[in-house]
Image (cartoon, helix red, strand yellow):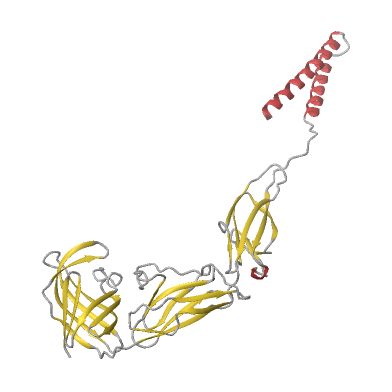
């Protein structure tokens, strides 16, 4: 387009020059001017025409070096749930600038290029939609630039004010038993339920276990991810609790809130069977067993060389085992496992918590419970396709 306009301008000026030249040529032939005078007049006329042709009636354009941005923050939620202090805006990690919960702030003189605009100071009960920080492209122009618009949408839910027990406190059971569900409720300052709140449960005494579903295997501490329950539409969250060793067991429920965490504690008592414990040695040695590596597969054919089982009066146990796999795979290993147990009449249940077997042959996630039959002097378990017989030593 610019090239076309330039051509038109040149044609117009060229036509004017032809008229001027013809006038000067006629004047020279008439003898009224000398050649030098005619050429000086020609050059003078050319200068006048060119200078007049370059005169533009439009505004002068000056490239803009810096461009402003207009950052708008829009917050939804009940007034009681909004942050009265507002938020803080920053560009490219620079110093912060205050902005209200529903306001627009103009940040001037940003150089051409890409910039990161970040919104901070968002309360824990509020969330920013989309990415934060925002990526903004500031482009230079040949006219005074209008501010580049950036929008942050923030939504706020009711702020938790308390967490209360609904059910599951003060239960009894044997070590390792699954209790009735533990249920808590989260309320706002007006007593209304608060949905969508993460409630963290942690065992604080007794070495028990907690999970978000019954019979789940990922609730044991270790490799598996343990999801955190979230309150439902009634503001309630639920977990399952497995009792630990003898003595008081406690479970802590925590909700993060502005100021300080909200907490409640559940308690449960394992009922003792009166079993005094004892020390046992593995007598079914020499047995060949197929072991599967939790990480790499298997099976591996190994021979059980020795083993022991110590049942403590407090309900905890420690088991050991030595295995020889050299005939087939050229290695041997030993393992120490700990947990708690429960005795009822002639049955015993071992609940595994930890294992020293880093190879994963006896990973506690795969062997969380083993049931056996016991008499006065012997305990017999059936696991991994073989019989494990222990005889009392004391």
Q: Is residue 164 left or right of residue 394?
A: right
Image label count: 0
Residue at image location 53% in from the left, 79% down from the top = 164
* Percent position of residue 248, x then y: 39, 87
Q: Nearer the viewer, residue 246 or 24?
A: 246
Q: Is residue 305 left or right of residue 150?
A: left
Q: Nearer the viewer, residue 50 or 280?
A: 280
* Percent position of residue 283, x then y: 13, 80
Q: Where is residue 24, by image quadrant?
A: top right
* Percent position of residue 279, x then y: 20, 87
- The quadrant of the picture occupied by the C terminus is bottom left
Image position of 265 with respect to 382: above or below: below
- The quadrant of the picture occupied by the N terminus is top right
In the picture as drawn, the residue positioned furthest to the right comes out as 32
Image position of 8 with respect to 186: above or below: above
* Percent position of residue 92, x then y: 59, 58
Image position of 324 with respect to 89: above or below: below
Residue at image location 86% in from the left, 13% down from the top = 33
């Amino acid at each position: 387009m610019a090239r076309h306009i330039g051509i038109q301008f040149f044609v117009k000026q060229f036509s004017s020059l032809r008229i001027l030249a013809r006038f000067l040529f006629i004047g020279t032939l008439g003898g009224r001017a000398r050649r030098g005078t005619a050429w000086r007049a020609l050059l003078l006329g050319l200068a006048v025409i060119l200078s007049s042709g370059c005169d533009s009636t439009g505004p002068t354009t000056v490239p803009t070096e810096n461009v402003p941005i207009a950052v708008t923050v829009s917050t939804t939620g009940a007034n009681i749930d909004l942050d009265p202090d507002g938020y803080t805006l920053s560009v490219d990690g620079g110093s912060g600038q205050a902005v209200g919960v529903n306001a627009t702030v103009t940040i001037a003189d940003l150089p051409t290029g890409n910039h990161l605009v970040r919104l901070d100071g968002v309360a824990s009960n509020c969330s920013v939609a989309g990415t934060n920080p925002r990526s903004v492209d500031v482009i230079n122009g040949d006219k005074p630039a209008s501010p580049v618009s950036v929008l942050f949408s923030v939504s706020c839910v009711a702020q938790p004010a308390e967490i209360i027990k609904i059910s599951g406190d003060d239960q009894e059971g044997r070590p390792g038993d699954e209790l009735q569900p533990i249920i808590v409720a989260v309320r706002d300052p007006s007593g209304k339920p608060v949905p969508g709140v993460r409630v963290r449960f942690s065992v604080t005494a007794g070495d028990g276990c907690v999970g978000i579903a019954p019979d789940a295997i990922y609730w044991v501490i270790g490799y598996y991810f343990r999801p955190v329950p979230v309150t439902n539409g009634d503001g309630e969250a639920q977990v399952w609790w497995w009792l630990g060793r003898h003595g008081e067991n406690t479970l802590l429920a925590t909700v993060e809130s502005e100021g300080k965490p909200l907490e409640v504690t559940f308690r449960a008592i394992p009922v003792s069977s009166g079993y005094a414990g004892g020390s046992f040695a593995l007598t079914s040695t020499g047995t060949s067993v197929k072991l599967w590596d939790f990480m790499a597969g298997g099976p591996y054919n190994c021979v059980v060389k020795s083993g022991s089982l110590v049942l403590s009066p407090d309900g905890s146990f420690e088991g050991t085992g030595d295995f020889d796999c050299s005939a087939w795979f050229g290695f041997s290993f030993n393992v120490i496992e700990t947990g708690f147990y429960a005795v009822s009449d002639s049955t015993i249940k071992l609940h595994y918590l930890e294992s020293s077997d880093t190879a994963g042959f006896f990973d506690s996630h795969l062997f969380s419970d083993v049931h056996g039959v016991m008499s006065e002097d012997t305990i017999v378990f059936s696991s991994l396709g073989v019989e494990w017989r222990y005889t009392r030593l004391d």
